[in-house]
Image (cartoon, rainbow, N blue to C red):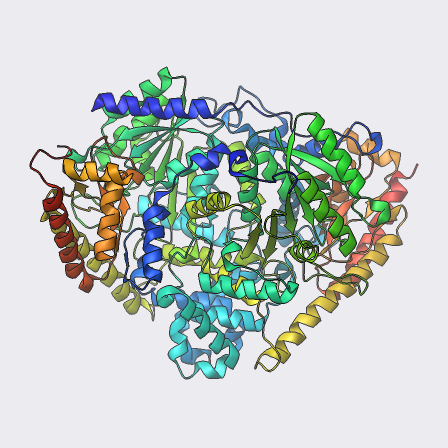
Amino acid sequence: MAIKALDYDTLNENVKKCQYAVRGELYLRASELQKEGKKIIFTNVGNPHALGQKPLTFPRQVVALCQAPFLLDDPNVGMLFPADAIARAKHYLSLTSGGLGAYSDSRGLPGVRKEVAEFIQRRDGYPSDPELIFLTDGASKGVMQILNCVIRGDGDGILVPVPQYPLYSATISLLGGTLVPYYLDESENWGLDVNNLRQSVAQARSQGITVRAMVIINPGNPTGQCLSEANLREILKYCYNEKLVLLGDEVYQQNIYQDERPFISSKKVLMDMGSPFSNGVQLVSFHTVSKGYWGECGQRGGYFEMTNLPPRVVEEIYKVASIALSPNVSAQIFMGLMVSPPKPGDISYDQFARESKGILESLRRRARIMTDGFNSCKNVVCNFTEGAMYSFPQIRLPPGAIQAAKQAGKVPDVFYCLKLLEATGISTVPGSGFGQKEGVFHLRTTILPAEEEMPEIMDSFKKFNDEFMSQYDNNVGYSRM
Amino acid sequence: MRRFLINQAKGLVDHSRRHHHKSPSFLSLVPPQSRPLASPAPASLVSLSRFFSSTSEMSASDSTSSLPVTLDSINPKVLKCEYAVRGEIVNIAQKLQEDLKANKDAYPFDEIIYCNIGNPQSLGQLPIRFFREVLALCDHASLLDESETHGLFSIDSIDRAWKILDQIPGRATGAYSHSQGIKGLRDVIAAGIEARDGFPADPNDIFLTDGASPAVHMMMQLLLSSEKDGILCPIPQYPLYSASIALHGGSLVPYYLDEATGWGLEISDLKKQLEEARSKGIAVRALVVINPGNPTGQVLAEENQRDIVNFCKQEGLVLLADEVYQENVYVPDKKFHSFKKVARSLGYGEKDISLVSFQSVSKGYYGECGKRGGYMEVTGFTSDVREQIYKMASVNLCSNISGQILASLVMSPPKPGDDSYDSYMAERDGILSSMAKRAKTLEDALNSLEGVTCNRAEGAMYLFPRISLPQKAIEAAEAEKTAPDAFYCKRLLNATGVVVVPGSGFGQVPGTWHFRCTILPQEDKIPAIVNRLTEFHKSFMDEFRN
C-alpha cells in the first residue's frame, strides 16, 4: 500500500503504555491451554458465575419479565413466575419510557436512582440526592468518567494504593495522567499509613505534580483488608487538608468475612465528621452489581454517588455521560433490585434470603480455607481475606527461582504463576500486575472456586509450590522479609 | 523501603513526563480557507458550546473554589466537547413535561414529542418478539426446564436460547465474557456479515461493545495522540464524532456534504480538505463516513463508495464506517452496501486498507437502544495494533451479555421455515414500511413550508430540513444570544411540544440553518405533528417576515 494507515509506531502512546494484567499474559496462556483441552481453574478475575455460582432467582425472574413484557399479559404467566416478581417487573417497566429497548436518561432511570438514594440513606443514616447519583455500565465506566473529568494532563497526579486494582493504573495511563503510588503495609494487614501518604504526596509535588485525587479500595482489591472507621477519618481529614477528591471504590461492600470490622462507607464517616469536613471534602463513591452475593458481572451495572461536587461540574459529567447516550437498561433494573431486594413477608423473600446467605457464608468459609491453605505452604505467607473476593499471598522466591525467571526472560512472579498454571491449571494473576514493593512477590487468586473443590485446589497448589520451592531452594535466603 | 517508594514515585513521574508533551489544545478545528462559503467549521462547531450554558461562563471566583474539583479545574477537553442531541433543548423539554403534568391547560399541546433522538421504543415502537423471547430465556435459563414454557414461548426461541447458552462457558450469562465478546456469538455475527456481503468475515475481527458509541471512542483513543492528529468528518455530522475527537484531544478536519446534490460526498472536496489540513501540520489519520447518513439521511451510491475506498487507500487513511443504519433504507433506487464488501469487490484485502465498520442494535427495525449492544469489525490492522485494541477492550472487562446476545440475533434473525419466521417478517416489514411512509409524509410537509427545503430521507431515521430564516428572526436570536436555528427550535418546542435538534449541533455551512427531526413518532401521531409544525411555522414567519 502507498502509505501506512496505522502502524504500531503511530498509535497513541498512552494506549501503548497502559497495562491491564487481569487479562494479560497469564490469562491468554490459560485460554490457550483450555482450548487444548486442559482443565483450567480461572481465579484471575472476580467473576463468580463463571466458576459456578448460580444467579439469585428473584432478580433474574424480574428482568426476564421486563425483557418479554408480553408475558405479563398472558393469563398463564403466574404458572412460571411468582406474583411479587410480576409486580416488580411492572413497577420497573413503569419507571422506563419504553421498556428495556429505549435509551434512558443518560444518568440512568430517575426511579432507579431514587431507589439507590433510599438505599444509601438507609445504609448511612444520612440523606442522599438522586440527582447526584449516576448509573453506569459497571463501576469501571464510572471510574473512567470521573478520572476523565479530573485529569488534565501529566501534571495531574492521582494517589493510588499499591497493590492496586489495575483499572486505576490503566485508566490513568489512558488519560495521560500521573499515578502517584502509596504503599499499603503488608505487615500491618495491608493497613493504610497516612504518614506514608504524606511522603508520596510531598515527593510528587517536588516533581511539579499537582496531586488532585486519592483512590481507596475498601474492602481492598487485591489485598482484602477492611478499613477501620478511624483510618477512614484520617484519610478524609487528609483529603480535606490537601484538597484531594476522594474516589471511594466500595464495590465489595457486601463481601465481609469477619465481624470486627464491618463495612462502613466513606460517605457515612464523612457526614459523621461534620463541618468543615462534611461540606469540604469532595467524594465520589462507586458501587456495582458485579460483586457482593450478586456477582452479576455480565450485566455491566453500577453507580456512583457524588458528594460536594459543584453543580456545574455535575453538569459537565452529565454532558459527557450523555455522549454515551445511556447505560444499559436491564442492568439499571438489576441495580434497582440490588438496592431494594425482597422484604420479609414477600413471596420470594425466603428463597432470596436463603440463596444470598448461602453464597455469603460459603465465601466466608472459602476465604478461611484459602488463607490457611496458603499459610501452610513453604515460603508462602498470606494475610486473612477480611473482605472482597481475593487472596494475595506473598511468595518468597528463592534466588534460584529468580535466576531461572531471568533466564526465561520473565518477571519472577510471572514465571512462578506460569509454572503454577502449567502444572495445576490454576490461573492466577502475578503480583507485579497490581504493584508491589521491590523484590517482594505475590500472586492474586479469587476465593471463588466452588467450595467443594477448594480443598483439592489448595492441595494441588501446595504440592506444586512445595516442589517448586525445593527445586530452586539452595538455602541462600529468600527474596525478601 | 521508603527509599524505594520514593524512587518508584519518581520513576513513575519521570516516565510520564518523558512521554508527554501535551499542551492544551485549541488548535483543533481547521477552516478550509480556499472556500469561503464553506469555511468556518470552527465557528459552527464551536458555537455548540452554547448549548450547555455552563461552559460559556467560567469564573475563577466561584464560591466552591476552595474545593479540589471545580469548573475551572476540570479537564478542559471535557469542557470543550458538546453533544447537542441531549443538550439545552432537551433540558427545556423535560422541564416542560414536568410542568405539563401540573398545568395541563397552560399549554397549547398535551404532550412532549421527542423527535430529538433516534430512540424508537420510547415513542411506542414494539420490540421484535422473537428477540425478546430469546433474551428472556437466556436471562432466566431455568425457564427452559419448565414444561409451561412451551405454552408461552415460540419453539425456535427455545431452540435458539439453548444454542446460545451452550456457546457461553458454563451457560453463565452473569459472568464477564471474553473482552471481545463471547466467541460463539462472534461466530454467528461473522456468518451474518458473510451472508450480507458475500465475502468472508473472521470472528476474531469482531469486538462486541456496549452500543456503537464506545467502539467509536476506542478507535479515537487509539488514533489520536494530540491536536496534531486529525480525523476527517462529514459536516453535518453526528455529534458523537466531534465530541469524541474533542474528548481525546484531536482535531476535527471537516469535509462538507453537498446539500444541493442530496448531501453528496465529493472526493475533490475531501482531497482539498485533507491537503489543507496537512499543510497546517495535521496528520490526518482517518476518514469517518456515516452511511446511511446521520443527520442527513442519504444513502451512498456504490460508485461513490468505491471512490472513497480508493481515496483512503491512496492517502493511507483508516476508514471508519458508521453503518448503524444499514437496515434503514426507504427508497427503491438505493441499496445499502457495506464498505467492506465494496473494498473486497475492488480486490482489496487485509493488506490494502484499514477499515472499521460499526454496527448497533439500537437502530434498524429493531431499535433496541436501551440494550446497549453493538460491535465493530476491525480489518486491515497489524497484529500489534490489534493487541492494543484488545487491551483497551479488556480494561473495561466486557460489554453487557444481553446486548451481546441481541447483536448476534439481529445478525441472524429467524429464517424461512422457522416457527417465528412469519410473525418476525410481519413485524419487521411493518416497522420498515411505516418508517418509509412517515419519512415521506414529513418530508412532503416540510417542503410545503415557506422557506423550507428538505432532501429526502433515503435512509437512517432523520430529516434535516434547511430553513431560510428572515433577518428579523436572526436578529431576535442574536438579542437572546442564541444561534438562530436554536431560537427557531425553542420556539417550536414552546408552541408545539415537538423536540428537534438545531442544525448547529451537527455543523452546517455557515449562514445556513437546519434542524434534525426523527421520523420516529408513531404513524397515528404524524398528521397532528404535521399540523402543529405547519401552523407554528406560519405564525413564526408572520412574526418575523421582513
Q: Residue furthest right?
A: B546
- Looking at this view, is A410 or B256 the one in front? A410
Q: Is residue A69 above or below residue A163?
A: below
Quadrant in the rendering for residue A407: top left
Left or right, residue A80 beside residue B461: left
Residue drawn at x 42%, y 42% is A305
Examine the rendered structure and indicate whether residue B418 appears above or below residue A324. below
Q: Give whichever of B113, B333 is nearer the camera.
A: B333
Note whether residue A468 is visible: yes
Q: Position of residue B95 (x, y in %)?
A: 62, 46
Query: Can residue B506 be seen from the camera position used here?
Result: no
x then y, percent, for residue B474? 83, 34
Query: Compared with residue A330, is residue B93 higher up or lower down, i.e. above or below?
Result: above
Which residue is at a point 22% across and 28% down the rendered structure image?
A193
Task: Report the quarter where the C terminus of chain B lies.
Answer: top right
Q: Residue at x 31, y 38 (%)?
A: A164
The picture quadrant where one finds residue A293 is bottom left
Q: Is residue B237 above or below residue B57?
A: below
